[in-house]
Image (spheres, rainbow, N blue to C red):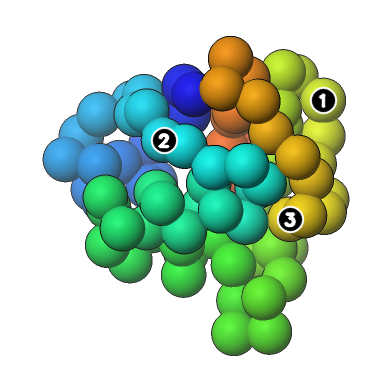
Amino acid sequence: MRVAIPSPLRSYTRGRDEVTATGATFAELLDNLDHACPGIRFRMIDEQGRIRRHIRFFVNREPVSDLAQALHADDEVQIICALSGG
């Protein structure tokens, strides 16, 4: 499936704004993405296995909050990073 990568994470994908990854669940997708792009999963998922506060996931434009959510090969995944600053 197609995975849209936000600018802050593109250093893990060699600058690509979109990659292809597989997985029957969102957790599997992130594991496979991390295998292809080492270190990217840790930027999105914390040590307790929870989605980091500044990350939002969408599948076919619908928000995802459960990493056990089932996926299909033709799904489109978007990763969004919230911006902060001061």
Q: Residues within 10 Å of mark 3 (few under 14, many from 20)?
A: some
* Gap between marks 3 and 2 measured at Cα: 15 Å
Q: Which element carries disc 3, helix, strand or loop?
A: loop
Q: Is residue 42 left or right of residue 67?
A: left
Give the Cα separation between the discs numbered 3 and 1. 14 Å
Amino acid carrying mark 1 in the image: Glu
Whole-percent x, y for residue 30 in the image: 51, 53
In the rendered view of the protein, which quadrant contains the C terminus? bottom right
Q: Which residue is mark 2?
A: 21
Give x and y (percent) for residue 42.
46, 70
Instruction: Name the foreground residue: 15 vs 19.
Output: 19
Q: Residue at x 59, y 85 (%)?
A: 47
The label number, if any, that marks residue 67 in the structure image:
3
Residue 49 visible in this rendered orientation of the protein: yes
Provide the secondary structure element on which disc 2 rests: loop
Query: x, y (%) of residue 36?
Result: 26, 50
